[in-house]
């Protein structure tokens, strides 16, 4: 990862984000305490003081939220360093997290489950923790993407190695919401995986905004980056059916995917526009449809951003920027078609049919009383319709400038103001050149322009298989056998003696090899070897990854000398007890209240079985049921059931509950 202490613009923003997250956390806790006191007290004087305190805390939270929004709209830091005359693109900020110590939980599990010396895996655990720490400050390039994907794939190995179905890893993961700054804490590795996926998508957006949009290669890279960002975010939305934070909710991810595809569409138009637009009839028709498509997709993005529940958490300036871009590109479409009508009169050698067909494709319907061919042939009608489009272009430009002026954050982006002002002046100048004294006699309303594009923009699904990683805990053995789902006996030592060159058993399988066809009367059986045992060591040499032929070679190489084998036997998987865990999601839909929910477990008849409840996060598409709670992870205990209680969100925790 990058140096976290480097004084770059991006690192400063991330450091400010981390500080704001801590301040929001403190304010949320203060608010939760005040709300609990308000519900508990009956003293009117105390209630008045608490209400006054709550008003201060609410104001403080609002100010902190506005500061966080300011970081999210600090787009200049992420743009290319080269001077450019383009509207800035919006990146996503990386989610912040707290440090995590895997050492004790993983070492305990290795000792308990795999019956191995956990001290031999200290380096592997340290490598995993170093990789996680590096992922907090990834470089803004493909190397950073590969590092995040590597950690995501390593989490898959950790999940299979150390997470049995009946218990959690025992590590508390804390991630901060990218938009609200509210932390979410869970003893669930799926929260870690989802957050890493979000950061992969966010890093792609930062790479896209960093590309040089003054070159063809830079624009191609930007389009590719935004499409990949949309693919990762779409994959996150489809894979995690229940998410604990606003920035990873399905509605929010849906909006973010649309925004990334809109920015990719914008870069495609800039590619076409890069070499200059020839003032030629059919070229301008094509440009009109392309730029109208950009305006349409940004209009859809703006509409999606203003829908509940996204509206409350999406940065206000993002919504206004989408509206500005929609008006700006719609104005450009009207300007281009006005140029077609005002500057290109039908000449004797021109193909009337082709021009009529091209122009008619721009409109769903023409103004009443006008025919496309008649407009092409009649100079007065061409001029009137052209001026109508210029008036509409000026209206859209003025609306974009008005919205930009009303938003404090956007008002301070100089290049945005320059681009909008220049386009507005160009349309005004064009309109002034066409102005005559009899304009007021005939005012035509400019028809809407039909968007059309020849360039397909769609999300690119993440290709995790292209990043090759090695399991840090490779020494534990093949994952298909040595996983958290399987339970084993402790390794047993078998002293093996050859009998007339015979072993008394056969071997089968891949890695590790398995004993079968064991002769009950052989010395191996007498020494304790069992049918179905797995051989993990021969003569002190680890052989978990060796095949049948390689193990046989080792057995034969000893000759007539006694040999020690280490074998393990598979146990029946039994439901095991696990410690209770409490999790909290510190953000409610309309408040920033700290809500801690505890579940009491009472002893009841042992003959009844507790139904296995679904986890809060569902990995995969099988679970489509709505989560019963978005506040806690229920625990399943074998041989007992829970008495259902109606708990208030502010229920006091009892002595048996754990608060994180």
Image: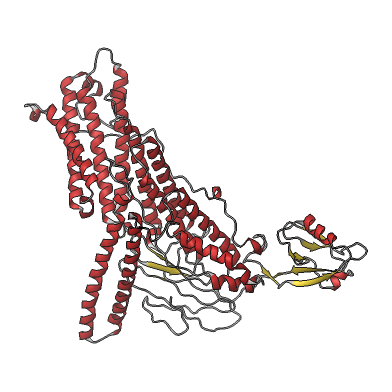
Q: Position of residue 620 (x, y in %)?
A: 52, 57
For the C terminus, give its image quadrant: bottom left
> Compared with residue 393, is residue 179 higher up or lower down, i.e. above or below?
below
Q: Position of residue 491 (x, y in %)?
A: 72, 71
Residue 264 picture quarter? top left
At horizontal 26% and vertical 25% (from top left) the residue drawn is 279
Q: Among all residues in the image, which is located at the extreme bottom?
A: 43
At horizontal 47% and vertical 50% (from top left) the residue drawn is 143
Q: Position of residue 84 (x, y in %)?
A: 28, 41
Depth check, front residue: 184 or 275 = 275
Left or right of 166, for residue 491: right
> Compared with residue 240, is residue 387 higher up or lower down, i.e. above or below?
above
The answer to whether residue 621 shows anywhere in this view is no
Depth check, front residue: 265 or 95 = 95
Here the colouring is secondary structure
Depth check, front residue: 605 or 70 = 70
For the N terminus, give its image quadrant: bottom left
Left or right of 99, for residue 396: left
Q: Among all residues in the image, which is located at the extreme top?
A: 348
Q: Position of residue 88 (x, y in %)?
A: 29, 46
At horizontal 49% and vertical 79% (from top left) the residue drawn is 643
> Compared with residue 583, is residue 305 higher up or lower down, i.e. above or below?
above
């Amino acid at each position: 990862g990058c140096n976290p202490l480097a004084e770059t613009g991006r690192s400063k923003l991330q450091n400010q984000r981390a500080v704001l997250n801590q301040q929001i956390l403190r304010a949320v806790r203060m608010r939760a305490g005040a709300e609990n006191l308000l519900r508990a007290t009956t003293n009117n004087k105390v209630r008045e003081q608490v209400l006054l305190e709550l008003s201060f805390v609410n104001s403080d939270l609002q100010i902190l939220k506005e500061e966080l929004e300011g970081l999210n709209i600090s787009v200049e830091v992420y743009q290319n360093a080269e001077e450019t005359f383009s509207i800035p693109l919006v990146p996503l900020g990386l989610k912040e997290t707290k440090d995590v110590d895997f050492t004790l939980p993983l070492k305990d599990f290795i000792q308990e489950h795999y019956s191995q010396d956990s001290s031999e895996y200290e380096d592997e655990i340290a490598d995993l923790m170093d990789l996680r720490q590096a992922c907090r400050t990834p470089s803004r390039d493909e190397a950073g993407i590969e590092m995040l994907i590597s950690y995501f794939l390593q989490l898959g190995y950790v999940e299979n190695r150390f997470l049995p179905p009946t218990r959690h890893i025992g590590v508390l993961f804390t991630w901060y919401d990218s938009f609200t700054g509210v932390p979410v804490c869970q003893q669930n590795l799926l929260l870690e995986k989802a957050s890493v996926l979000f950061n992969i998508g966010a890093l792609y957006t930062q790479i896209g905004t960093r590309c040089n949009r003054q070159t063809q290669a830079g624009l191609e890279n930007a389009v590719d980056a935004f499409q990949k960002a949309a693919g990762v975010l779409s994959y996150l939305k489809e894979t995690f059916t229940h998410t604990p934070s606003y920035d990873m909710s399905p509605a929010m991810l849906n909006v973010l995917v649309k925004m990334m595809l809109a920015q990719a569409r914008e870069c495609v138009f800039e590619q076409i526009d890069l070499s200059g637009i020839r003032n030629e009839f059919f070229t301008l028709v094509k440009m009109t449809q392309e730029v109208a498509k950009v305006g349409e997709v940004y209009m859809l993005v703006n509409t999606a951003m203003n829908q509940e529940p996204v509206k409350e958490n999406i940065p206000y300036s993002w919504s206004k920027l989408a509206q500005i871009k929609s008006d700006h590109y719609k104005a450009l479409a009207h300007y281009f078609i006005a140029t077609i009508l005002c500057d290109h009169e039908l000449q004797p050698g021109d193909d009337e049919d082709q021009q009529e067909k091209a122009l008619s494709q721009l409109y769903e319907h023409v103004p009443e009383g006008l025919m496309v061919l008649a407009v092409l042939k009649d100079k007065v009608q061409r001029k009137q319709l052209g001026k109508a489009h210029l008036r509409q272009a000026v209206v859209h430009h003025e609306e974009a400038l008005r919205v930009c002026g009303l938003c404090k954050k956007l008002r301070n982006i100089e290049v945005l103001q320059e681009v909008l002002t220049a386009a507005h002046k160009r349309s005004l100048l064009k309109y002034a050149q066409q102005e005559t004294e009899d304009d007021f006699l005939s005012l035509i309303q400019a028809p809407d322009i039909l968007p059309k594009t020849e360039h397909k923009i769609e999300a690119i699904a993440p290709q995790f298989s292209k990043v090759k990683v090695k399991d840090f805990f490779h020494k534990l053995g093949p994952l298909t056998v040595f996983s958290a789902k399987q339970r084993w006996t402790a390794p047993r030592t078998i002293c093996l003696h050859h009998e007339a060159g015979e072993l008394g058993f056969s071997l089968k399988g891949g890695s590790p090899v398995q004993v079968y066809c064991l002769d009950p009367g052989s010395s191996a059986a007498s020494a304790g070897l069992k049918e179905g045992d797995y051989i993990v060591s021969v003569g002190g040499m680890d052989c978990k990854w060796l095949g049948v032929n390689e193990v046989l070679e080792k057995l034969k190489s000893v000759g007539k000398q006694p040999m020690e084998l280490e074998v393990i036997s598979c146990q029946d998987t039994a439901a095991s007890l696990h410690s209770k865990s409490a999790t909290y999601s510190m953000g409610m839909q309309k408040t920033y209240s700290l809500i801690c929910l505890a579940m009491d477990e009472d002893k009841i008849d042992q003959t009844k079985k507790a139904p296995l409840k679904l986890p809060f996060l569902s990995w995969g598409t099988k679970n489509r049921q709505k989560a019963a709670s978005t506040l806690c992870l229920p625990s399943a205990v074998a041989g007992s059931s829970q008495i259902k209680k109606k708990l208030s969100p502010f229920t006091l925790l009892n002595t048996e509950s754990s608060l994180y």
